[in-house]
Image: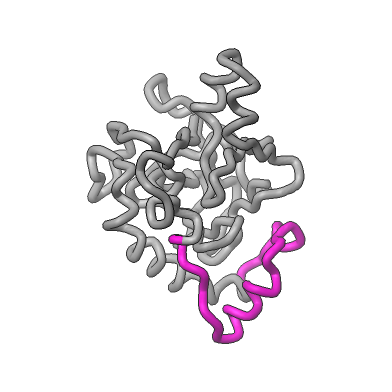
Amino acid sequence: MLHPDTELRFIDSKIGFGVFATRPIPRGSITWVQDELDRVLTAEKLQQLGPSYAAILAKYSYLNGRGEYILCWDLARYINHSCSPSCLSGGYNFELAVRDIGVGEELTDDYATLNLSESFQCLCGALGCRGTVSQDDVYALAGQWDDAVREAFPLIAKAPQPLWELVEEKWEVEAALAGGEIASCRVNLRGFTQPDSLRKCATRGG
């Protein structure tokens, strides 16, 4: 489920739609959490669904660290890529704002965290844009993503959290906030645990 202070807006014909903040979303806010309405599909199930669903799943689903395809039921599937994302995930089934997100600012992910199957040309226009987003970016950037999450993580206890009740890993989060270890994003990155030949995924976005 996506943070309630968001809405869908059309950007342009190249990018399509994106998700934007309707109120300030402070750093440390949980911006998305996997919930009971999200579809969890195995690779076998995707094959059973056949080609009629292929284009939809290729555009709107992503692959988690267990090799399951997640199809978000709400506007979360329209979150676009940025090489300087406003939202990231550690080793949990939720994302948090790694910087303050102002009214009218787009919520973005780094698609390289979603277990890409192939590279794509980036149109994000962010400062430091990589130009091409690769499935191999995880090896170079995982530490950077962990640093961003680690810096924002303590603010979970201070920011309003309308999605907190949906977080399944509450005790793990609370333990980390009490000084324990913050789970690395590598938990969700199949490139660190699986051969490249098994890393299959679609991107998520508008």
| Relative height, residue 70 to residue 53 (above, below) | below
146 vs 78, nearest the viewer: 146
Q: What residue is at 52 percent from the left and 19 percent from the top? A: 55
Q: Is residue 23 magenta?
A: no
Q: Position of residue 126 (x, y in %)?
A: 29, 45
Asked where in the image residue 168 lies, by quadrant, the reply is bottom right
171 vs 66, left or right, is right
Q: Position of residue 111 (x, y in %)?
A: 41, 43
Looking at the picture, the colour scheme in use is one colour
Q: What residue is at 30 percent from the left and 35 percent from the top? A: 119
Number of numbered tags placed on the structure image? 0
Q: Position of residue 66 (x, y in %)?
A: 56, 50
8 vs 166, nearest the viewer: 166
122 vs 90, left or right, is left
| Relative height, residue 189 to residue 8 (above, below) | below
Q: What residue is at 35 percent from the left and 43 percent from the top? A: 196
Residue at the extreme bottom: 179
Asked where in the image residue 50 lies, by quadrant, the reply is top right
Q: Position of residue 41 (x, y in %)?
A: 64, 36
Q: What residue is at 59 percent from the left and 13 percent from the top? A: 52
| Relative height, residue 102 to residue 69 (above, below) | below
Tell me where the magenta segment starts and ends, as one range: 159-186
46 vs 86, left or right, is right
Residue at the extreme top: 52
